[in-house]
Amino acid sequence: DIEEPQPPYTYDTEVLMEGEKVWPPIKALSYVSKLAGGRLLCPPGNCTCYSTASFMLAGLVLASKLNVEYDDLDLGKQLGIKGLQFPGKDDKLSELLSVPGVVNSPYWPKATIWHQNPSILGGTGGNLVGTTSAVADFFRKLFMGKLISESGLKEMVSDRLITRGRGAGWLSYGAGLMPVSASYVGADSFDPAVYWGAPGQTYGF
């Protein structure tokens, strides 16, 4: 069940209406490109925004480099970390990750979800799942500089205030990570309990 779509929910509405279908990255990126009308949001370097599409595109580049299909990307194997995987088209895993109920978020149209194909969550755009120990191992190796270069890690933790789109004016983001407060403090207070990660929510989860 989906209410009348309202901007900026066009893309999310279509995804929710076809939540049980497979959404290949090319289909999602083509849809985003169509909505953008071939126009840049702003000149390069002049604004900051949250972009799942960019990470999906990076996943396609990685798959091409490794000479595998996008759905066969095995990041856990590439990183040497057991227990990490992209759900892809795994309907059984989708059942485990989906919580039936009403989507209650200001970012998406109101919808009731019973089932969803995990491919709609974006793959390399943020759809990596794993055991607690595997995720901990991933972040340990990441911050110890064992997964990317020192300059790459610096970019990940150099947060910039988002200026366009979702989170504009209040959310800061690096190249894949954001500073997250581990405790609530007043808006004018300094909170030393901050960790780097990327919390979030998805349809039906």
Image (cartoon, rainbow, N blue to C red):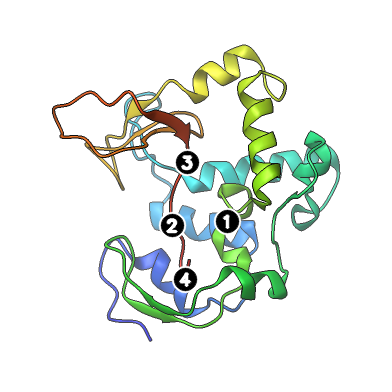
Residue 18 in the image: above or below residue 54: below
Q: Are marks 4 and 1 in contact (CB under 8 Å)?
A: no
Nearest-to-viewer mark from 3 and 1: 3
Say which element carries label 3. loop
Say which element carries label 2. loop
At label 4, the amino acid type is Gly
Front position in the image: 66 or 80: 80
Q: Are marks 1 and 2 in contact (CB under 8 Å)?
A: no
Identify the residue at the far right of this view: 67
Front position in the image: 79 or 63: 79
> Residue at 81% of width from left, 55% of height from top?
72
Give the residue number, with chain letter if any, for mark 2: 201
Say which element carries label 1. loop
Q: Are marks 3 and 2 in contact (CB under 8 Å)?
A: no
Give the residue number, with chain letter if any, for mark 3: 198
> Residue at 65% of width from left, 19% of height from top?
144
